[in-house]
Image: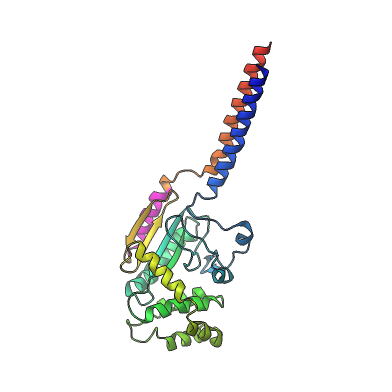
Amino acid sequence: MQNIEKSLLIFFASITLLTVSQVSADSSMSNGTMMHDSAMSGNMSGNWGNSSMMHDDSMMKSGSMMSHEKIDTSMAAPLMGSVGAKVTIVEFGDYQCPKCDQWFKNEESTIKANYIDTNKANLYFMDFPFIGTDSPIAAQAAYCAGDQGKYLEYHDYLYQNQGAIQSGWASTSNLKSIATTIGLDSNQFSSCLDSGKYADRVSHNKAVGTSLGVKETPTFFILAPDGTTTEIDGPQPAAVFADTIDKISTSAVPEFGTLAPIVLVIAIVSIIAVFKTGLQRSL
């Protein structure tokens, strides 16, 4: 009988350790994103407006960014917001797109203030250049600016100063002038842009959008912690995004990590019960 009791104790102890290890591992994935290893995550820094840009430009150049469980964001722009946010917004946009410009100027600031800055959501911008021949080169130019730590400034400048489609405002020569305007090293920027360094990155992002059925911009995907996805097409008001994000937040399943203490207590109580039963039988 004593051997049985010992076996049961070993069994329950093993279950306890395995369960706690599993819930801890699940907790690290609870926001639907694949995390960097510890050595890489310790180097994440930078700014996107007043919020945290979780991938600095050195990280961008190495391609060591995150991929969402449902959408490949490995080549996306730097993350706007906290890596730990439960809700992820993926935006597909074209710098020559008037509707994208409309959403950027009228709605993004509200989403940023209410959800991104408060760590309730984060946002990836992904290139979907389809409107004209200047669209892909404009997208590449933003990443070239990122090589000098000014992806954000360049991204914002393009939308803030958007001209008519294929009017020349986003031509290669004008993109180089913009680089000078915002204080970039013109030679380094021109070399990057002329080399087509980020052509594959931009093409990759567009291919991801195409695989998801994106046909126009802006198109958004709101990703919940459980992996479910809500698509929002066009420059919808911030209230539409708020409604979706709020519903996700109120219905979100608690993180597995918060259940670990409960699982541990149950396991310990079970062990004690088995031990007491064995003790009473031996008396």
Question: Per the image, is 172 magenta?
Answer: no
Q: Percent from the top left, x then y, of residue 238?
A: 36, 61
User: 62 and 179: which one is in front?
Assistant: 62
Q: Is residue 13 above or below residue 93?
A: above
In this picture the colour scheme is rainbow
Query: Which stretch did the figure color magenta?
Result: 236-249
Residue 140 visible in the picture:
yes
Q: Is residue 37 above or below residue 137?
A: above
Picture quarter with the C terminus = top right
Q: Residue at x 37, y 82 (%)?
A: 134
Picture quarter with the N terminus = top right
Is residue 196 found left or right of 233 in the rendered image? right
Q: Quadrant of residue 207?
A: bottom left
User: 61 and 77: which one is in front?
Assistant: 61
Q: Quadrant of residue 258?
A: top right
Q: Percent from the top left, x then y, of residue 135?
A: 38, 78
Q: Residue at x 39, y 72 (%)?
A: 105
Residue 160 visible in the picture:
no
Q: Is residue 173 above or below residue 57?
A: below
The number of numbered badges drawn on the structure is 0
Q: Percent from the top left, x then y, of residue 182?
A: 51, 82
Q: Residue at x 42, y 80 (%)?
A: 137
Question: Per the image, is 245 magenta?
Answer: yes
Q: Percent from the top left, x then y, of residue 83?
A: 53, 58
* Most common SS among magenta residues: helix
